[in-house]
Image (cartoon, grey):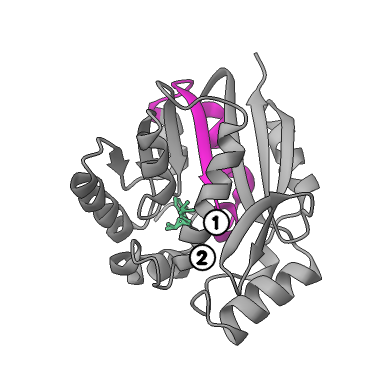
């Protein structure tokens, strides 16, 4: 297995693959936050006709939303059971999405500078070397292309809410989904992106109400946040 993977994390997502599309299942929170994440992407560009790589696509929640908006999507993930579920669901939805069980680094080696847009949503905090995923994302982009990351900030508040409350108190997310040490500060993400030839264009917090299950874009980056970068021409 290539080094930039956490076997336990992949096993975790494979274990829940069958329930990926259950809006009340273990991945329900991803269903709840997906419209706000898509709104962040679409405030920068029209996805119609764009070639998109969705890195760490899982069962395909974002990939399907982008395909419905007219994008030509390649979805990749190293949890191969999740990719199988994504394929089946796209078939049922009548969407043509190219799903592959491969790594971001392999796709970048195979298809450099081929994509208008890269999305990497709630994935960076699950890999040992997130900077390498940022670098691969930059390699995949055409000059001027956009990449969107969402991840969890390494703050006490995020630890209390995303792990303490969501995993242990409320059971919104399966226990073991997150490791606090892997959370990423916005300045770290920006630093890795800049080193990969990406310029920061926008950032937003993603505020989530665990009682109403409503998520919206906000100014508070202290828990879940999104960043948009453009590849330097
Ligand atoms: C929290 S889920 C997010 C899934 C999807 N992006 C979404 O937001 O709906 C994290 C995903 O990252 C994937 N992942 C973890 N490590 C990976 C790696 N090294 N390469 C590709 N995908 C990976 C997991 O298998 C899982 O599907």
Image position, residue 113 (x, y; %): 49, 20
Q: Which residue is mark 2?
A: 29
Which numbered circle lies on residue 210? none
Quadrant of the frame with the N terminus: bottom left
Is 53 left, or right, of 41 in this rendering? left
Give the vertical position of 59 relative to 41 (above or below).
Answer: below
| Point 39% across, 72% down: residue | 25
Quadrant of the frame with the C terminus: top right
| Point 61% across, 58% down: residue | 215
| Point 40% across, 71% down: residue | 24
Note whether residue 165 is visible. Answer: yes
Query: What is the spatial separation of the Cα atoms under label 2 and label 1, in whole angstroms?
Result: 6 Å
Image position, residue 116 (x, y; %): 49, 23
Residues drawn in magenta: 110-139
Image position, residue 91 (x, y; %): 19, 45
Indicate whether residue 117 is drawn in magenta: yes
Task: Mark 2: give few (<14), some (14-19) or many (20+) Cα within 10 Å.
Answer: some
Q: Are marks 2 and 1 in contact (CB under 8 Å)?
A: yes
- Does the Cβ of the disc 1 residue fall within 8 Å of ligand 1? yes
Task: Mark 1: give few (<14), some (14-19) or many (20+) Cα within 10 Å.
Answer: some
Q: Which residue is mark 1?
A: 33
| Point 55% across, 54% down: residue | 122
Is 158 left, or right, of 130 in this rendering? right
Secondary element at image label 1: helix
Give the vertical position of 201 relative to 106 (above or below).
Answer: above
Image position, residue 17 (x, y; %): 32, 65
Is 55 left, or right, of 216 in this rendering? left
- Does the Cβ of the disc 2 residue fall within 8 Å of ligand 1? no
């Amino acid at each position: 297995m290539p080094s930039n993977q956490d076997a336990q994390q992949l096993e975790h997502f494979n274990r829940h693959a069958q329930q990926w599309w259950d809006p009340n299942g273990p991945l329900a929170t991803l269903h709840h936050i997906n419209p706000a994440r898509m709104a962040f992407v679409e405030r920068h560009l029209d996805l119609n006709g764009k070639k998109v790589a969705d890195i760490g696509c899982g069962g395909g929640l974002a990939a399907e939303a982008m395909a419905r908006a007219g994008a030509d999507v390649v979805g990749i993930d190293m949890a191969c059971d999740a990719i199988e579920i994504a394929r089946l669901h796209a078939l049922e939805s009548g969407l043509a999405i190219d799903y592959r069980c491969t790594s971001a680094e392999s796709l970048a080696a195979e298809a450099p500078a081929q994509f208008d847009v890269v999305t990497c949503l709630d994935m960076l905090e699950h890999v040992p070397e997130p900077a390498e995923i940022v670098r691969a994302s930059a390699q995949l982009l055409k000059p001027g292309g956009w990449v969107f990351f969402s991840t969890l900030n390494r703050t006490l508040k995020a630890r209390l809410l995303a792990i303490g409350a969501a995993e242990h108190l409320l059971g919104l997310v399966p226990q073991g989904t997150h490791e606090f040490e892997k959370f990423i500060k916005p300045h770290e993400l920006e630093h890795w992106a800049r080193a990969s030839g990406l310029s920061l264009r926008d950032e937003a917090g993603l505020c989530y109400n665990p009682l109403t299950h409503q998520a919206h874009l906000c100014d508070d980056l202290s828990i879940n946040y999104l960043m948009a970068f453009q590849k330097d021409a």
